[in-house]
Amino acid sequence: MERVLILGSSGFVGSNLVAQLQRNGHPLRLASRTPALLNRSAWQQHQRVQADLLVPSTLPAALADIDVVYCLVHGMTEGRDYQRREADGARNLAAAAADAGVKRIIYLGAVCPDGAQSTHLSSRTETGEILRQGRVPVVELRAPVIIGPGSAAFEVMRDLVSNLPLMITPRWVRSKMAPIALDDLLFYLQLLAQTDECDGQILNACGPQVLSYEQMMQRLANKLGKSIKIIQVPLLSPDLSSHWLRFITSVPDGIAKALIGGLKQDLLVDDLPLRQRFPKRLLSFDEAISVALTQEQGNLLAQDPSLSALLKRRWQPNFAFYPKTEQATVLIDATPQQVWQQLCQIGAKPRYFALDPLWRIRELMDAMIGGEGRNYYRRDPFHLQLGDRIDSWRVAECDEPTKLTLHFGMKAPGMGGLTFTLRPQQQQTELTVKCWWHPAGAPGLLYWWAMLPAHAVIFQMMGDKIRRLSEDSAVVSVT
């Protein structure tokens, strides 16, 4: 059986491909630029390595003794010059794979018809061309919009449908394509590793229905029980409309803008060669939506199993898949254990370390609408354990002395919490205070933006207060 390396294992397609291949007994090596993202309990039997296509020295160890490489990485979240970085990464991979004796590279690109003017689409095309210039045979599988839980294109659509009952849109909503279900894409990716008959080919993987973006949003709205009205305005371009996406969707800005920028024309291509080579009944768009909504909770659990109890109990279909986040980081002249001792007193004597009057006001507002904001309680003023109640919060994750997650328990349109992460840094501890929020539709987004000015200040102040308390405690313990 082929030995497989998946570059981009922690991403949307990569993580789902891992699950697909491991069910079929493939020996896998999983790679990511951030090894911590590979620490999932279901992946412990696989080799896991750090590999960055922009750091050639990380590639030989990742590619050693590998037969097939899946290249599922992209750079859309990394700023305006991501196309240059994608090209550099492709050159590094092509050279390193040849030196390692790899038999085949399977590259997941994007459907790109002639004349396409999108930076995102042209960058994917250029990446495939650079890979083919190397000595290792390449199969490039090009896909349009993928319908699955966590797919950026699907989640942008869902956020638009959930948050905007009335949409004023440019003409890009008329752009047509044949969206493909995630399960069907994984079917093709898996089979491409098992044959050399497609080496050197560019294959298009499409779904069975050609739909406009407007038709897709209307069908998704029907599935979600929403009513939407779309008004087209010819003066709005995709580039212009992409600038307000950060206020409407939880999908990372760079990815959302790149996707919308690719909708300037129809994305229609010939997928007959792939369908003839690998016959299969493909899922319709409506079927793909149903499967995605069924699978999404399981995908979230796989990404962060430490929050499984919370997600199983609280998750609702109208929550955005990607959370909105705000965070602050401080360096502390103390050990992680000393910082943890101070952190575990949250809700007790130091309350919430910063701007306590604002917390009191928010708790009062919650109590006025029937919430538990003023039901103050702590089991122990100095120690925490999983499931503990801290006023209206619950301890959802307690990994001493590295990570503490509190689930927000006051009434609000969505699900969220606070995560405190401690990392040793030589003689110091890096403390990150991160607020995360899965908004429930437009009310959830409005709530997030209303709270953001306070969030921008309060979490930095919390970190600074914990730093001072920890450093004072460290001095006392030394003396």
Image (tube, rainbow, N blue to C red):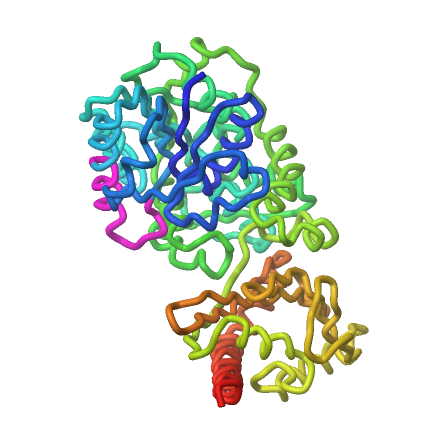
Q: Determine whether 366 is above or below 446 in the image.
A: below
242 or 349: nearer the viewer? 349
Q: Is residue 470 magenta?
A: no
User: Residue at horizontal 31%, vertical 36%?
Assistant: 61
The residue sitting at 48% across, 84% down in the picture is 471
Give the image location of residue 323, x and y in percent.
55, 57
The residue positioned 31% from the left and 15% from the top of the image is 199
Q: Is residue 236 above or below residue 463?
A: above
Q: Quadrant of residue 40?
A: top right
Q: Considering only vertical position in the picture, is 440 above or below 49?
A: below
Number of residue marks: 0
User: As displayed, is residue 100 above or below residue 231?
Assistant: above
Query: Is residue 80 one of those drawn in magenta?
Result: yes
Q: Which residue is located at x 39 percent, y 73 percent? A: 427
Image-based side of 352 in relation to 51, left or right: right
Which stretch appears magenta? 75-91
Indicate the quadrant containing the N terminus: top left, top right, bottom left or bottom right.
top left
In the figure, residue 175 lies in which quadrant?
A: top left
Residue 258 picture location, percent across and down: 36, 46
- Residue 256 x %, y %: 42, 49
Residue 471 vs residue 153, the one in the foreground: 471
Q: Nearer the viewer, residue 147 or 376?
A: 376
For residue 174, say whether it is visible: no
Q: Position of residue 309 (x, y in %)?
A: 71, 52
Give the side of residue 372 with respect to residue 59, left or right: right
Q: Is residue 122 left or right of residue 30?
A: left
